[in-house]
Image: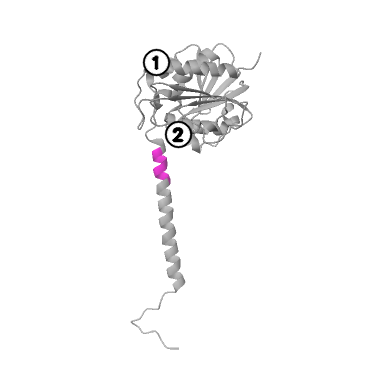
Amino acid sequence: MPATPRNQQPRRPKRSRLRRTLIWTFSVIAGVFVAAIAAFLIWANVGVMAAEAGPLEAVTTDRAITVSEVDGSLVLSPADAPSDTGLIFIPGAKVEPSAYAAKLSSLVTDSNMTVVIPQPLLNLAFFDTRTMDDFAAAAPDVTTWAVGGHSLGGVRACQLADSPDVAGLLLLGSYCANDLAADTSLDVLTITGSADGLTTPQKAADARGLLPADAETLEVEGANHAMFGNYGPQSGDGTATISDVEGREQIAAATATWAAELQPAG
């Protein structure tokens, strides 16, 4: 067997080079994956739209409303009378749950409902896999449940509404992506705004066929997307041409009629 010349290094096996290439490729892919996850987590937790102080204070100081936090959910319940009807309301993407307290408070004071507003995982309802039972645990005395939501939270609420345990659906500036048209027992109210730049009236109209034929619809003239909560202006939204007080009154009147249909007979 001839000897290897002193000035010539033995060739590295091809397997060794292939192994190093695979390790390097895997490391690059893993690094990109980790960086993408980190970037997403930062995005999901930065820029969360907080509740405006004034409207929230009006709710927390209202003696007719008991405000509590149960397992991360904001719970608004009637202070003086027990409530057997409740609403689980899913916030829009990156909107603080308490930003909806003022707009939904009339359901507590005028319709004797308990309102549960959960904190979605990563501030995005799509990533929250909790079930109706999980949300309902925040108010165990409630026997009749409705679900609702704003914007993308409403899309998630529609998924929860596809259950025999849900009696009603409330959509504010939102629409369904799943088909509920065949559910004739579901009391549905969808409220949109004519100045909504995100859930535009056309988008809501295009998805109307996914709701039961008897679903009630209301378009609030001059309301924009952010008017369904109290968290300030939102990028991409239209400009409201009515005051927040006017918008709140119209929303309260419509939801009161809807809530009355959910009350157990007798």
Circle 1: residue type: Val
Circle 2: residue type: Asn
x 43%, y 50%: residue: 33
Neighbour tally class for label 2: few under 14, some 14-19, many 20 plus, Cα within 10 Å:
many
x 44%, y 70%: residue: 16
Main secondary structure along the magenta-highlighted residues: helix
Looking at the rendered image, the disc whose residue lies closer to the viewer, 1 or 2, is: 1
User: Could you say where residue 93 lies in the image, as x and y percent from the top left?
Assistant: 44, 33
Question: Between residues 5 and 157, which one lies in front from this camera angle?
Answer: 157
Please give the range of residues in magenta: 37-43
Residue bearing mark 1: 245
Seen in the picture, residue 28 relative to 141 is either above or below; the reply is: below
Question: Between residues 98 and 243, which one lies in front from this camera angle?
Answer: 243
Residue bearing mark 2: 123
N-term-proximal mark, 1 vs 2: 2
Asked if residue 41 lies in the magenta stretch, the reply is: yes
Q: Is residue 90 visible?
A: no
Q: Secondary structure at mark 2?
A: helix
User: Could you say where residue 243 lies in the image, as x and y percent from the top left?
Assistant: 36, 17
Q: Is residue 21 visible?
A: yes
**Residue at the extreme right:** 266
User: Could you say where residue 23 lies in the image, as x and y percent from the top left?
Assistant: 44, 61
Question: Between residues 240 and 130, which one lies in front from this camera angle?
Answer: 240
